[in-house]
Amino acid sequence: MTLETTTAQLVDDEIAEVADERRGSRGRTAARAVLRTLVDIVLVVWAAATLTFLAVKLIPGDPLDKLMAGIQDVTPEMRAAVAERYGLDQPVLVQYLSYLAGVARGDLGVSYQRGVPVTEALWAELGATAELTAWAMVVAIVASVVLALATSGRRPVARLLAQGFELIAVSTPSFWLGIVLMTVFSFGLRWVPAFGGDGPASLVLPVVTLAVPLIGVLTQVLRERMEHALHEPFVTTLRSRGLGESAVRSRHVLRHASLPALTLSSVIVGSLLSGTAVIETLFARPGIGRLAVDALQDRDIPLVMGVVIFAAFVFIVLNTLVDLLYPLLDPRLRRNR
């Protein structure tokens, strides 16, 4: 064996060893990331369940009164039997620990008022809420992109008008906006129905009401990031190569500006889920938001806690997806890794 062959073999062995170490390091990093995600999910769900349980317990009134409503001549024995059935005769700490144990098993309990498992009640309303939030998200994204492209880097008048719209959109209460839209377009012009969840027309007002605040937030983020990106060297290079202004903005600047907006997606969905409680109640639509409001009014503790845990789970899952997608969309992060 010659010296050159021996040296080449040693170099190949070192390269293979370094590659194995890198693969092992990436594997350990991935395992730690998965473990950290699981721990985050458990902590968020536990915190949501604990805080909601305490908040519901602090609401004045006795859940038994709601459970026994409409029953004539309620005897102490009947109240005791109902309390025992739902575990309300146990100390608060025992109720809390029992509920946490059920959540760990995937059992969110039984709704006091509906008499069905909480998971079944949530599943029955999930479709209506998903439809509403999905359309609101689509409208918000499309409108924000159009407004940001039209106003970023333009004359001061256009920028001032955009800032004024963003401020009004973000600060306007959803219920007030919904009432105004309902009064004008439903009661006045009679273009779309005001209440109910039947047909595409019934989605128009709720979707617009839910989307307007998001349009204000997303437009502000996209416009500011686009104005910053327009002064980056890569934009000057693209223009010097003869690329048109519209192509520079839509193909390159918008993509560069949309990455920071991606980090807001979990917050946006959380805002949508919380906003559905107002919108679905105002427009008398079915959905998880209205289900939560009804459950609070009825002191339906298992159902209230089920809604909160569901929202917390959606929030943490979306955060995890954003963490996974961001490096895939931003090559700079991949190189750093």
Image: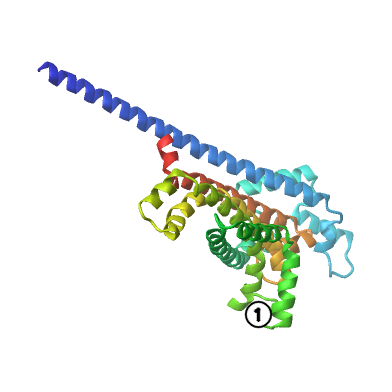
Number of other residues with Cα within 10 Å of mark 1, as a class: few under 14, some 14 to 19, many 20 or more: some
Q: Could you tell whether 33 is left or right of 75 in the image?
A: left
Q: Is residue 337 visible?
A: no
Q: Quadrant of residue 74?
A: bottom right
Query: Residue 211 location, x and y as percent?
Result: 63, 64
> Relative to 20, is 256 above or below?
below
User: What's the colour scheme?
Assistant: rainbow
Q: Residue at x 64, y 75 (%)?
A: 197
Seen from the viewer's position, the closer of residues 320 and 145 is 145
| Quadrant housing the N terminus | top left
| Residue at the outermost left position | 1
Query: Residue 32 location, x and y as percent?
Result: 49, 34
Q: Could you tell whether 131 is left or right of 177 in the image?
A: left
Reading the image, the residue beneath label 1 is: 192
Q: Could you tell whether 27 is left or right of 262 in the image?
A: left
Query: Residue 201 location, x and y as percent?
Result: 61, 78
Callout 1: SS: loop
Q: Is residue 281 visible?
A: yes
| Quadrant housing the C terminus | top left
> Relative to 20, is 90 above or below?
below
Q: Quadrant of residue 132?
A: bottom right
Q: Residue at x 61, y 60 (%)?
A: 158
Q: Type of residue at label 1?
A: Val
| Residue at the outermost top position | 3
Seen from the viewer's position, the closer of residues 301 and 209 is 209
